[in-house]
Image (cartoon, rainbow, N blue to C red):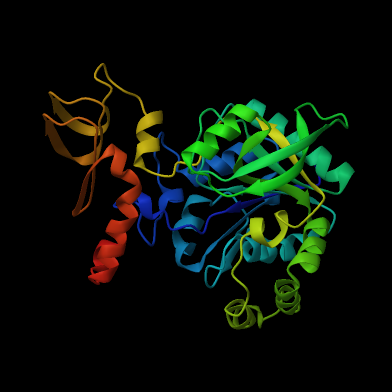
Amino acid sequence: MSNNYCLIMAGGAGTRFWPRSRVKKPKQYLSLFGNQSLIQETVSRFANFIPEESIYIVSAKSQKEVLEEQTANLPKENLIYEPVGKNTLPAIGLAALFIAKKDPDGILIVSPSDHLIQNDELFMQTIGSATMIADKKDGIVTIGITPKFPATGYGYVKTADEITIGQSIKSYSVNKFVEKPNLKVATEYLESGGFFWNSGIFVFKVSVFLESVSKYSPRLYADLLRINEFIDTDDYEEALNRIYNEVESISIDYGILEKAENVFLVQGDFVWNDLGSWEEVYKYGKKDENQNSQKGEVVFIDTKNSYVYAPDSLVAVVGLDDVIVVQEGDTILVCKRDHAEEIKQVVGEINKRKLNQYL
């Protein structure tokens, strides 16, 4: 994979992982299962088959310190910072400008920084199939996760005909992208077959991507060309701050994928989870005989099916089932597991009260 590049998207806020996830150290910089943070695990996974000098990261400028600390093995010039968040398409477009100067026909693998992926060998084979399609078909390829249950929290991709060009993993042309469904519709998707979860992992030639931006998001493309004039000049930072604030905020799904015709899907059967909440961490964590999962000194009395993170203190949970407890510094979260998605509302309330020291 000598002409392959990786772009890791690391600008998210991770509000559902408060109180561990903070403005200066959000979810992707947390160690949730082992010694490495999620972004370090992502870099290591791609470094198995892509040279570190070909791995790029795009992130928020507010995360510069923690990003450089956790990715010291990567060249500093490969760390690209957005002055303000503008969704996925501008972020990918900004990074693509830098890679295009180095290798305009290079194949770029775009990946989130904060997902759980297991079975690295199968993952590598899946990415290999996607790069082959991107190269031979001049297409935009997404990795679609084979659904295990009728999930309502994921977008879906509906496939059309199967394609065969020598790749090792089943692959298809894409019929359409669909929004997060309700339970009834998600159940119908699962029963009918041909639908996959949208993993947020994309593969394409840099040139094909930029041509697609030009065709389907011309306003953004014009702004990217303006930024491109200043790359490698002393005026880059000033120009980026000025121009990027004006660019259209749009996702790659809306901006390109839902409009383009040369879109393909490679079937992903490796273990995947987008780790959207503490509930997902509980599901994948090690558990005792009462299905409790813990990090730190914890005393469980008459308690089942619960998750406690408290590495710096002793926590006792008595007579409570299905709860999440997270202690971080001077903050404590206690919630029912089935309310884990609502933690972002806590962050909203803290913002509302201007208690910024807890964010």
Comparing 178 with 358, the one in front is 178
Mark yes or no: residue 116 visible. no
The residue located at (73%, 79%) in the rendering is 226
Residue 356 in the image, given as x and y percentages of width and height: 27, 68
Left/right of residue 184 with respect to residue 255 in the rendered view: left
Coordinates of residue 54 in the picture (x, y in percent): 71, 50
Determine whether 356 is above or below 134 in the image: below
Query: In terms of image quadrants, where is residue 233?
Result: bottom right
Q: Residue furthest top?
A: 289
Could you say which is closer to the camera, residue 32 or residue 198? 198
Towards the viewer: 333 or 320 = 320
For the residue pair 344 and 78, the one nearer the viewer reads as 344
Instruction: State whether residue 152 is above or below residue 81.
Output: above
Where does residue 304 sit, x and y in percent of width and height?
21, 25
Left or right side of 85 for 268: right
Numbered-mark total: 0
Quadrant housing the N terminus:
top right
Whether residue 64 sits left or right of residue 331 in the image: it is: right
Residue at 45%, 41% in the rendered image = 275
**Residue 185 x %, y %:** 54, 39
Answer whether residue 181 is visible to the viewer in this image: yes
